[in-house]
Image: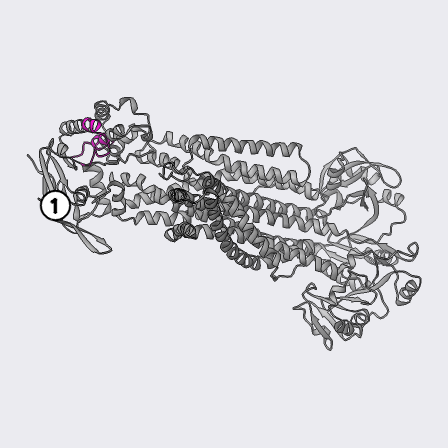
Amino acid sequence: MTALAALLSHWRRHPLQLAMLLLGLALATALWSGVQAINAEARAAYARAASVLGQDRLDRLVGPLTVTRYAELRREGWPVSPVLEGRLDGLRVLGIEPLTLPQGAGVAALPDLAEAGGLLEGRAARVAPDTPAEALAGLELVRSDDLPPGTVLADIGLAERLLARPGEITALILDPARPLPGPIPDDLTLQRAAPEDGLARLTDSFHLNLTAFGFLAFAVGIFIVHSAVGLAFEQRRPVFRTLRSLGVSARGLAGLVLGELLLLALVAGVAGVAMGYAVAAALLPDVAATLGGLYGAPVPGSLGLRAEWWATGIAMAVAGTLVAAAGGLWQVWRLPILASAQPRAWGRANARARRMQALAGLALWAGAGLALVLGQGLWAGFAVLAGLLLGAALVLPLVLGGLLALVGARARGVLTGWFWADTRQQLPGLSLALMALLLAVAANVGVGTMVASFRTTFTGWLDQRLASELYVTAPDTETAAAMRVWLQPKVQAILPIVEADQMLGGQPGSVYGVADHATYRENWPLLAAVPAVWDQVRDGTGLLVNEQMARRQGLALGDPVDLAGGPLPVVGVYSDYGNPSPQVMLGLAAFRARYPQAPELRFALRVPPGEVAALASALGDRFALEDGALVDQAGVKAFSLQVFERTFAVTGALNLLTLGVAALAMLASLLTLAGLRLPQLAPVWAMGLTRGRLAALDLARTLVLAALTAVLALPLGLALAWVLLAVVNVEAFGWRLPMQVFPGDWLRLGLAALAAAAVAGALPALRLARTHPAAMLRVFANER
Amino acid sequence: MGRNVLQIDDVHKSYPTAEGAVAVLTGVSLALAAGESVALTGESGSGKSTLLHLAGGLDRPDRGEVTVAGVALSGLEDAGLARVRRDRIGIVFQQFNLIPSLTVAANLSFQARLAGRQDQGWERHLAGALGLSALLGRYPDELSGGQQQRVAIGRALAGRPGLILADEPTGNLDETTGEAVLALMLGLVAEAGAALLIVTHSDRLAGRLERRLHLRGGRFA
């Protein structure tokens, strides 16, 4: 205990160092655990949603359905449960039959028997919080976080009454756990469940980005910890030797230091997780809106407390501290008792060490290059990212040193010459903080470019893909035929969209038939195509494939694709963001010839933009269309843009936090260096420079280093964006987004980095400007 | 002998401590003419370095006046004091205090260039006289203690200031090297026509200067 007290007394005498260590670790943990909290909350929400509203994730039978037909099917042993869907005053009403509902398709919505009783008797309905209840007067309403806003879950009988559709059934859900008694009856159509991994993969892309951001922020925070712990080790070297010479064993000493570190890590870890909760709570509403809007993934906008991320957050803090302190601990373990007790200047790595470090960085780059060329899968993508970022951080001091030497050699004035030489000399002490800044700015550029590229590409793609003003899906072929007749005089064009399931290259996929029309010829987002591609599609001599199918199956233009009725060559490849499955497009005539049984239920309608709303309303009323049967192009686009604005809000907040952590790393280093700087600055002061001028030069030095680092971070960030867009995205999701650059964003980011550096440099500069002459004089004299 | 290069009139200086203020100088006066050399001696803590710092405009007295080359320092702000230090005074420190990021050549000329008075011929002469000609491209950490102190002396003299202040200039050197460095400094100060004030513990060094002043109890004995 005595030895531990001697060790801990260091922190009492250096409270700022302790504060930096704890704050750095707490912030790093906060960002990491905050992001993890958001991810955990969102994933839990998907799981809940899958169990509450899992109907579209189960196979269903559709067609002319009545209660009588349902009863017949049940008697024949069909494991089906009826669902009635409809809209009431803007609410989505979902009628279910709790007793026959398959496991995993709604039980979570019925938490207790009493409520189930209420539902069965048609007295009660479950609604999402904040759902306006005027239309549900007289009902017993149970508010539930499990439901998306605007959804009413009720017994099918009550739903019939609410929707005034007695005896109707929208679909019959098939219980996946029970076998079907025979082939699907002719009067019904089997609708396959939407592939669940589609949503998971799409949302995974968002979570992957968040996790990458969280991890980078954590890494930046660990730089602060490394810096603070390293300095504390250096300053306590004489104490360590004294303790060793007084009889403390090397193992005992290392154990004591380890214990001290664990204590600090626990304190900072708990604080960090608590701060992370605040970060997550602040960001979750925007994340929820992003996921809900972009991918239809329902996530509540409020945060629950989960034991697992408290545990993982604190574990990360402890692991990060041990990683950051591993070098110091090793030195304590190996410390020779009789070596000189003169403390070395912390961070003053010699030139050879810097060259070795740069060589290690180059080796990491080479490894990243190899992973890029030879590697496969998502892990190869992550290996490229890790090698690229870590390599750049290691090479940075040498590159900065070279740049400063180059500029310094051209300096003519005495002060400018000293400024550049001195800046170069400060480099080793500041290099850790500058590495942190490099990573923060590069992450900002990289993730910002990726998100902005995604937004631009996705909205442009929506413009192309949703070129028609209105999309309508009829419930059956009779309605579709009637709809065509009704629509004919009211629209500029009716473009049928027909679809059939087809195994494509061994994977379940879809084949679409499209009409030959300028809507496609002028707008369809083709990534590659042969000349006169649309003529070949129209004539049935070629087909189009989506990008993910072309990439996964290695298809090039001219390669054959097997279809019902024989293979056809690929004449074009189109982008198809958001769809994980392979897809093929044929001319309408060729499609009808090859898939004659496919019903023609869906149409794209060309309508003058001003008439869309009126037509949609009239169409919906005339044919009693269900929710989702009408898709308004303008609404979808506006909504997508709104979603992206929220995504930007999330990434913007994370950007700011990461830069904040980097600024803190700089502040920690500058404060550390301030004490070591005085002997270098005092002679210059004595020779005739004021403290104010020296402080201004010191601040300028910080800004110059930050600016150079930010400039160097730009190509690194763009490389990061390229890897994310062209490697990680392709490996994870099958499509490659074209990278677009946004110099305006870089300028704003550069200014933000300089502002962060200015904030970090201001306090040490202010302290220097206010340094009492007596402190300067102590440099020169040991006596008075 | 013309106007005094350094005039110190009844200066007082005390430092705050945990036990209250400790008076270090209690009414010290001194005048130093151009070309004159004075040794300042005394016990540890007698106030020698404090007096040197006041003379160099590095610190301010609690009371009294310090005048350098006719300029009263008490009326000057930080920038004015810095200008006096830059233009009028050369200081040689015991710890040498060279600028580690600059070469010997850049260190030698640093203050002269700051003052806008670089004379390359004089610098070459100084470098030759101090035995530094072959070392001009080196950095301070590549030099011995004696070499570093010679650079510090050259730096103080390069701008031809009227007043040279030296705080134990040979205190960190062995006896032989110290002797050689001192001889060089005295010769070059005389050649430059500057006034010299040296703080030292060494009777032998003090004996080689024109005057010797001994501080005791905050006053000249």
Q: Residue at x 70, y 72 (%)?
A: A142
Q: Residue at x 12, y 45 (%)?
A: B216
Please state the horizontal and vertical placement of residue A451, each as a whole percent of the image. Answer: 60, 47
Please state the horizontal and vertical placement of residue A511, each as a whole percent of the image. Answer: 82, 45
Dividing the picture into quarters, in which one does residue B6 lie? top left
Furthest-left residue in this view: B1
In the rendered image, residue B179 lying in the magenta stretch gets the answer yes
* Residue type at the position of mark 1: Arg
In the rendered image, residue A198 lying in the magenta stretch gets the answer no
A568 lies left or right of A435: right
Task: Tell me the crowding category of disc 1: few under 14, some 14 to 19, or many 20 or more residues within 10 angstroms, Cα based.
Answer: some
Mark 1 highlights which residue? Answer: B216
| Of the pair A491 and A382, the residue shown nearer to us | A382
Height in image: A45 above or below B69?
below
Q: Residue at x 73, y 68 (%)?
A: A111
| Of the pair A410 and A438, the residue shown nearer to us | A438
Magenta-highlighted residues = B152-180
